[in-house]
């Protein structure tokens, strides 16, 4: 927290918003424009421009596009805004992984706690987010939901990224959010499993052999054919780059793919679960 001269405390600006604001300010000054001169060119007030540059306001898409047009930053402002939007609503420890996801050509996920964010419906995401203390404000909840849903564009972009998901059956049987939310969730899982680049497998509740007992993890392959791993716990997440550790995760994931139901049997189980609700 910072304080005004009168001692009134103010929340520190979000560091990502502040970085965007600093970038905007640098290009504006390079163009020889004051905030007052810049204001009529973009059609926003001096107060709005100042708030964005200080990292205290998220720039609107219209403002970003107009800024690029006026300052001719050769796409820098547009790229900065896209990066900002990707991170908005995401936990600090997850942002680096989210950036790697954008450039991935393959992504493998094992999850035993919740349905992966890339597969969640809005209602399921809301139920999950609003039930984990500390309870978010309405604005915080909406930003987290928006950030989660925005990442799902990765499933549909071309050229395709290859996705593999292994999810514990019990995660769905928990019925997070209630029966109706679970019905909608299963319908979405069935629909997404039909995408040519998505493999979805369920790990049955009774699994005498199980290679994922150390917890959830993810693996991805970059466009440079480098592999990265990620593990997450309470209020923490770790991007894994050491080849030995990444190799260990590969071995575990390979075992899990054998131990889980195959995609066809997983879809059959999902349909039976849907019918029982």
Image (cartoon, rainbow, N blue to C red):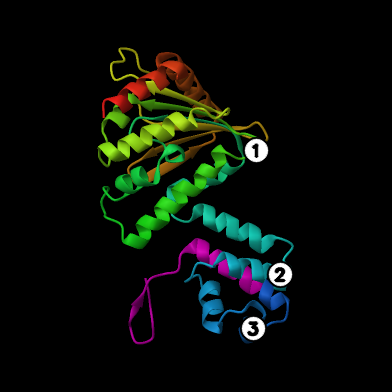
Can you give x and y, in whole percent of width and height, for residue 266 in the image? 40, 20
Locate residue 217, reporting x and y percent.
Answer: 43, 32
Name the one closer to the observer, 215 or 60. Answer: 60
Q: Is residue 131 magenta?
A: no
Of residues 190 and 135, the one drawn nearer to the viewer in this rendering: 190
**50 and 96: which is toward the camera:** 50
Q: Is residue 8 magenta?
A: yes
The tag earlier along the polypeptide, 3 or 2, is 3
Query: What SS does tag 2 mark?
Result: helix
Disc number for residue 2: none
Q: Quadrant of the N terminus?
A: bottom left
User: Would you say 220 lies left or right of 126 here?
Assistant: right
Q: Residues within 10 Å of mark 2 (few under 14, many from 20)?
A: some
Judging depth in this view, the residue of 162 and 11 nearest the camera is: 162
Discs 3, 2 touching: Cβ within 8 Å: no
Q: Which mark is residue 69?
A: 2
Mark 1 residue element: loop
Disc number placed over residue 158 in the picture, else none: 1
Label 3 and label 1: CA atoms lie apart by 39 Å
The number of numbered discs placed on residues in the rendered structure image is 3
Mark 1 or mark 3, which is nearer the start of the sequence? 3
Tell me the tag on residue 40.
3
Q: Secondary structure at mark 3?
A: helix
Asked if one can make out residue 262 in the rendered structure from this viewpoint, the answer is no
Q: What distance separates the C-alpha of mark 3 from that of mark 2?
A: 13 Å
Residue at image position (72%, 75%) is 30
Q: Which residues are magenta?
A: 1-26
Q: Residue at horizontal 35%, vertical 46%?
A: 123
Mark-to-mark CA distance, 1 and 2: 28 Å
């Amino acid at each position: 927290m910072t304080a005004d001269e009168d001692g009134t405390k103010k929340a520190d600006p979000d560091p990502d918003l502040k970085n965007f604001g600093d970038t905007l300010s640098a290009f504006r000054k390079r163009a020889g424009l004051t905030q007052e001169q810049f204001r009529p060119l973009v059609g926003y007030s001096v107060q709005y421009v100042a708030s964005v540059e200080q990292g205290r306001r998220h720039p609107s898409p219209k403002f970003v596009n107009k800024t690029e047009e006026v300052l001719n930053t050769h796409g820098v402002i547009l790229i900065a805004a896209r990066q900002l939007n990707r991170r908005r609503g995401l936990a600090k420890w997850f942002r680096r992984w989210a950036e790697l996801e954008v450039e991935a050509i393959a992504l493998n996920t094992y999850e035993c706690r919740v349905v992966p964010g890339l597969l969640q419906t809005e209602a399921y995401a809301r139920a999950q987010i609003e039930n984990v203390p500390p309870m978010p404000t309405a604005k915080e909840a909406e930003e987290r939901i928006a950030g989660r849903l925005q990442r799902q564009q990765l499933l549909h972009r071309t050229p395709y990224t290859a996705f593999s998901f292994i999810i514990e059956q019990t995660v769905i049987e928990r019925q997070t959010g209630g029966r109706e939310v679970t019905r909608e969730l299963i319908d979405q899982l069935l629909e997404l499993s039909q995408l040519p680049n998505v493999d979805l497998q369920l790990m049955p509740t009774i699994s005498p052999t199980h290679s994922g007992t150390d917890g959830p993890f993810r693996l991805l392959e970059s466009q440079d054919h480098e592999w990265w791993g990620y593990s997450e716990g309470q209020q923490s997440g770790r991007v894994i780059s050491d080849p030995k550790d990444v190799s260990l995760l590969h071995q575990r994931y390979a075992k899990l793919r054998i131990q889980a139901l195959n995609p066809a049997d997983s879809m059959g189980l999902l349909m039976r679960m849907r019918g029982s609700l």
